[in-house]
Image (cartoon, grey):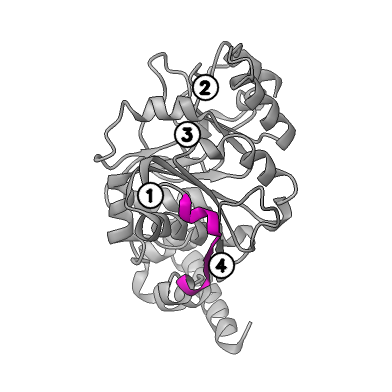
Amino acid sequence: MDRLDVFAFYTLLAIILIHIIIFPHHKKFLIPADLTTHYPESIHPFYEHIARTRNLKKLIPGIENSEPTFSLPSSGQVLCFVETSEKHYGDRVPSIASTWLGRCDNGRFFSKNPLPDAKMPFSTVYRNLEDDYDDLFRKTLFGFYYSYTYISKDFDWYLKGDDDSYYAMDHLKEYLSTLDPMEPLYLGYRMKPFLKDGYNSGGPGYILSNAAVRIFAEHLYHDEVLCPYDWAEDRGMARCLASIGIYPADTRDENGLHRFIPFRVNEWREVPDAYNYYPVKKNGTLVSEKFVSIHRLSPTKMILLDSILYPSSGKRLFTPEFLNLL
């Protein structure tokens, strides 16, 4: 760190210590996003030096789109972007490229470095962002902003995906066809802690309607008070959207079963109720027959699941109980 970064770091540390000593009535430690909300005038100047920039003049010059992306549709039902890292170019990326990503109307990988394999041609490179988990919040904000503002404003829905998640695209498109993209909708698996109205878990991905991403791009991306840095990308995105009245929607099916699957099914039942916005049954079926996404799949299991959902014979023999085996 240079001298200014060191000064900003120790100043923020001092403010946190003062907060703990002088304001003991706060029973829980405030994360940076909470600090900027409680003390925006004192925190914000120092916070700007620690949080990585969202300045488009610094980020846009680092964008490189692979040549095949220019042949992708500029309108349709769903634009999908998958945030990935160079360390997964040999395993997760090929499994996604060979299974569900091509079923998006416009599907591409977002990463810091170009993909090495011409068989995985659709990529947008962010050279001016970091290839680490600590930069995931900024990458996600910029991903939605860039997708809407620079790729196209003419998709109904914008999906941010993880590189260890699988999407049943026919289920997703069928579900989205029942909703109005001109309403500001925020879809995913709703978690309970930290925020009053919860947040959508980043694992199984989340989706913004055209109206929601337009509001985000026009009113929130550049506003670091309404949309402050949060080391937890999914919570930070929910806080950002909640500041303007957009909250997670209930995405369960008509039977109360879940479309977005955040954990392996057997592990899911062990997650404390305090983390799930809607109760999770300890027995019986959890997963909707028309599930949209499932998180924490290895590349091998992703390919296996795809072969079952989309068999070469054309005859699907899938039941939700199969997911218990993954």
The dominant secondary structure in magenta is helix
Read off the residue under disc 2.
Answer: 280
Q: Secondary structure at mark 4?
A: loop
Marks 3 and 4 in Cβ contact (< 8 Å): no
Instruction: State left or right for residue 151 relative to residue 283.
Output: left
The quarter of the picture where the N terminus appears is bottom right
Point 44% across, 40% down: residue: 105
The residues bearing labels 3 and 4 have C-alpha atoms spaced at a distance of: 27 Å
Residue 174, how many percent across, how many down?
A: 40, 25
Q: Between disc 3 and disc 1, whose residue precedes?
A: 1
The stretch drawn in magenta includes residue 316: no
Read off the residue under disc 1.
Answer: 74
Residue 66, how many percent across, how many down?
A: 56, 59
Q: Between disc 4 and disc 2, whose residue precedes?
A: 4
Read off the residue under disc 4.
Answer: 129
Q: Which residues are magenta?
A: 60-71
Q: Between disc 4 and disc 1, whose residue precedes?
A: 1
Read off the residue under disc 3.
Answer: 189
Q: As shown in the figure, which amino acid type bears the numbered disc 4?
A: Leu
The residues bearing labels 4 and 2 have C-alpha atoms spaced at a distance of: 37 Å
Q: Can the viewer see residue 243 in this picture?
A: no
The residues bearing labels 1 and 2 have C-alpha atoms spaced at a distance of: 39 Å
Name the residue nearer the viewer: 230 or 69.
69
Marks 2 and 3 in Cβ contact (< 8 Å): no
The residues bearing labels 2 and 3 have C-alpha atoms spaced at a distance of: 12 Å
Instruction: State left or right for residue 130 relative to residue 292.
Output: right
Q: Between disc 3 and disc 4, whose residue precedes?
A: 4
